[in-house]
Amino acid sequence: MRANHMDLLNQWRDQVVRQGSRYMVGPRGARLEKSLTNSCLDCHSNKENFCDRCHNYMAVSPYCFNCHLTPKELNPEQMTHNLTKAKEK
């Protein structure tokens, strides 16, 4: 996953934006939302450890967080809104 996560995220972005395909079935049969904020960051919530460390080492500046907020950056109203949206789907 470390070597190819950017390809997966780009595929998800294209599928969501261009085709409206917002969900996938994971390898263990779980239904996952194709979302950096609502899927990846649920488990990998420490951006400094899971994102910044490798991106800094590789000297890359992805534009993911130009739009996506990390859990620490969300205010309580946004967190409630995201949880409500996820439960509605």
Image (spheres, grey):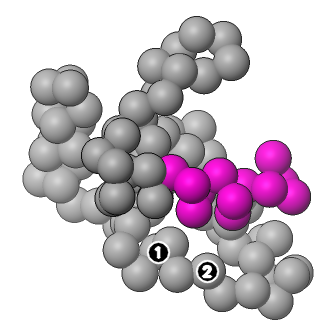
Quadrant containing the C terminus is: top left
Where does the image place residue 68, in percent across and percent down from the top left? Answer: 39, 67
Which element carries disc 2, helix, strand or loop? loop
- 19 in relation to 29, above or below: below
Graded by Cα atoms within 10 Å as few (under 14), some (14 to 19) or many (20 or more), the crowding at tag 2 reads few
Residue that label 2 marks: 62
Graded by Cα atoms within 10 Å as few (under 14), some (14 to 19) or many (20 or more), the crowding at tag 1 reads few
Q: What span is colored magenta in the figure?
A: 1-13
Which element carries disc 1, helix, strand or loop? helix
Q: For residue 42, say whether it is visible.
A: yes
In the rendered structure, does residue 52 fall within the stretch colored magenta?
no
Q: Residue furthest front?
A: 19
- 63 in relation to 81, above or below: below
Residue that label 1 marks: 65
Q: Residue at x 34, y 49 (%)?
A: 19
- 32 in relation to 1, above or below: above
Q: With 24 as the anchor, is 48 left or right in this view?
A: right
In the rendered structure, does residue 8 fall within the stretch colored magenta?
yes
Question: Disc 1 versus disc 2: distance between alpha carbons?
Answer: 8 Å
Q: In front: 28, or 74? A: 28
- The residue type indicated by label 2 comes to Pro
Q: Residue at x 36, y 74 (%)?
A: 67
Q: Residue at x 22, y 60 (%)?
A: 75
Where does the image place residue 63, in percent across and percent down from the top left? Answer: 52, 81
- The residue type indicated by label 1 comes to Phe
Number of callouts in the render?
A: 2
Q: Main secondary structure of the magenta part?
A: helix
- Do the residues under discs 1 and 2 have CB atoms within 8 angstroms? yes
Determine which of the numbered discs, if any, sits on residue 6 in the image: none
Where does the image place residue 77, in percent across and percent down from the top left? Answer: 12, 53
Q: For residue 41, say whether it is visible.
A: no
